Amino acid sequence: MLKLIFVYVGWWIVTGIFAIPLYAAEVTFTVTDATGKPFPDAVVALFDGKSAALTTTANTKIVQKNKQFNPGVTVVQTGTLIHFPNEDTVRHHVYSFSPAKKFELKLYRGVAANPVQFDQAGVVSLGCNIHDSMIGYIYVLDTPFFAKTDSQGQAVLTVADGQYTYQVWPAGRLKPSVEQKQHINGATAIKVNLP
């Protein structure tokens, strides 16, 4: 009985304090376009139905440089604060009229006074009132399990075994192009061919 208690306490310490799942599964997404070529900057996410209420207090930044948003596609969890430093020699006026987050950072150089908190899930389209060619996207997700595909169209997520729904958004799309249920049990490869 005493041995059983130590085993249970040891398991609780590993999983409870450090929040490390005992069985982590690596999920590899490979996203291609209609012709089979790798699709970079696609957003992939796994939803388990339990983590929807999770928010974060993380910070990140989207830099304005060479009259572009860098990165052009950003993926964050609900609650993230984003800074918008302007590294150009010209002033920018960053804004969004998207339902998920409406905001304006009026003409400035350097660092805007305050970061913007993205507290509602959805896709936020970014623009600059001065430079119409400046376009960016922020994907705000109610899940901690997300990534962006690399130049080979691949992204890897680590999750516990279980039942999930995955979604895939091509860069710039306001709704997922693919949504599918997936049971994860150990290493899993998911191939997605975007229409």
Image (cartoon, rainbow, N blue to C red):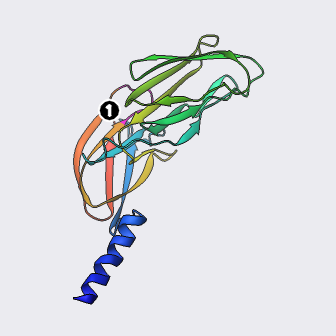
153 vs 28, nearest the viewer: 28
What percent of the width, then of the height, locates residue 86? Answer: 69, 26
Q: Is residue 162 above or below residue 167?
A: below
What percent of the width, then of the height, locates residue 89? Answer: 78, 21
Quarter of the figure with the N terminus: bottom left
Image check: 30 left or right of 151?
left
In the displayed image of the protein, which residue is found farthest to the front?
2
Identify the image quadrant of residue 146.
top left
Residue 58 is a magenta residue: no
Tag 1's secondary structure?
Answer: loop
14 vs 34, nearest the viewer: 14
Quarter of the figure with the C terminus: top left
Report the label total.
1
Q: Is residue 93 above or below residue 184?
A: above
Residue at the spot 52% in from the left edge and 21% down from the top edge:
126
In the displayed image of the protein, which residue is found farthest to the right?
89
Residue at the spot 48% in from the left edge and 40% down from the top edge:
40
Identify the image quadrant of residue 94.
top right
194 vs 131, nearest the viewer: 131
131 vs 51, nearest the viewer: 51
- The kind of residue tagged 1 is Pro
Residue at the spot 35% in from the left edge and 78% down from the top edge:
10
What percent of the width, then of the height, locates residue 59? Answer: 56, 40
Q: Is residue 27 above or below residue 57?
A: below
Image check: 79 left or right of 111?
left
What percent of the width, then of the height, locates residue 148? Answer: 46, 43
Image check: 50 left or right of 66?
left
Q: Tag 1: Cα neighbours inside 10 Å, few (<14), some, or many (≥20)?
A: some
Label 1 belongs to which residue? 176
Tell me the magenta residue range.
169-174
